Each structure stands twice: as structure tokens, then as C-alpha cells.
Amino acid sequence: MSTSSSHPRISSNTEGKCKGKGGRPQNEIWTYFTQGDRDLEGHASATCNYCQHKYTRGNVVILQGHIANHCMEAPISLVRKYQESLEESNTPRGKKRKGTRDQVYLDEYHDSNKPLPQGRVDRIDRALIKFFVCCGVSFRVVESPFFIDMLKELNSAYNLPSRDVLTNRILERELGYVNSRVSKEIESVGNLTMGT
Ligand SMILES: [Zn+2]
């Protein structure tokens, strides 16, 4: 199962609608969205089949986040399913494979020029989003050269996410995690009340 969906390359002659083209297997989330036109970078727009909310860029994590965190019309079983899958992808040992990033190095906890293992990147991403949200810091700061400088001093192997990735993908994932935990908490409290 492939969860990667970003395409950094710009292909100049991608035109109009070329639905489902390319060998990449489609993520299951697309069952719940209608794919529209693609932009210059090959991202298709996506319209939620339940509430008709439209995203100009149908990023898999963002779409999963929509079902898990925002959609008011999706069936609750589906909402829970995606809350849980976002929660899982948020725990260290996430199953994402991207290039050499998931390789584990002996010196993974030390500063080095080698790419960080994905689990480590995920942890830093999470710490970053918590800091931004809980301290009310503007997401713009993530692209400030001074902020980048500071993080590079702490760990030069960590590549900061773009503002877009931070405010969408990472935030959605964290939100899914929190919502899933809240639902579980409420369920367990419900059981407790019934038991006493
Ligand atoms: Zn929706």
C-alpha cells in the first residue's frame, strides 16, 4: 500500500483530466471522494462524496483527515476507522517507506549528515506541530530562516516541513490522533459509568 502522494516534480504537459493514470495504486480513501481535474503538478482535486466539500489538491492524508476530523456526513464507522489509521501512522514505528529514510543507523540519535530514520522524523514533526498549536505560534514561522537555522543547529539532518505540509498533513494526522484518543476516552468513561 502506498501512502506517498506528493510529487515534487513539475510536469509541464499534464493537461486536463487524466483520471487514475500512472501506475501508482490508488489509496482506498479515494473510494469516498470524487476525483476532478489535475493541476500542473498532477494533483487531482477531490470532492467528498458525503458532504461535497472540495479540495483542490487531493492529498491522501488530508482526505483521510477530512473524514476523521471534519466531515459531518460520513458514517461514524468510517470516521473512527480513519481516526484510528491516522493515530497508528502517528505512533513511532510508522510503516511509511520513503527512500532511505526508514533505514536505521547506529548513530540515529546523534547529529550526522545521514538522513534521519522515518520514525525519528515523525517524532520531530509531532513535537513541532504541538509546539505551533499549543503555543499559538503562526505557522508562517516554520519557513522563517531564523527558525530553520535554529533547528538545523539542533539536528542538521532534520528537514523542516513546508508550511503547507505542516498546516495540512501533519496537523490532520495529529488531529486524527487526538480525536481518536478522545473517542476512546469517552468510550471508556461511558463503560465506567455503566459499571458503577
Ligand atoms: Zn465530507
Image: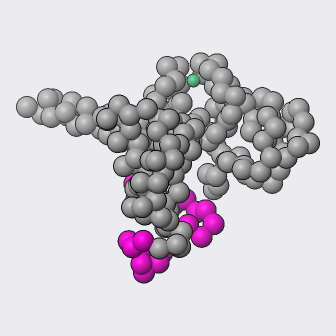
Residue occupying the point 79% across, 34% down: 39
Looking at the rendering, which quadrant does residue 2 occupy?
Answer: bottom right
**168 or 193: which is nearer to us?**
168
- The verdict on residue 57 being magenta is no
Name the dominant secondary structure of the magenta segment: loop
Judged from the image, the quadrant occupied by ligand 1 is: top right
What residue appears at the point 59 percent right and 35 percent down from the top-left corner? 63
In the rendered image, residue 133, in percent from the top left (x then y), is placed at 37, 35
Seen in the picture, residue 71 relative to 141 is either above or below; the reply is above
In the image, taking residue 176 as reference, residue 196 lies left or right, namely left
| Residue closest to the far front | 146
108 relative position to 159: left or right: left
Could you say where residue 193 lies in the image, as x and y percent from the top left?
14, 29
Q: Which residues are magenta?
A: 91-111
Q: Is residue 128 visible?
A: yes
Considering only vertical position in the picture, is 166 above or below 46? below
Where is the C terminus found, in terms of image quarters? top left
Residue visible at 50% across and 65% down in the picture: 157
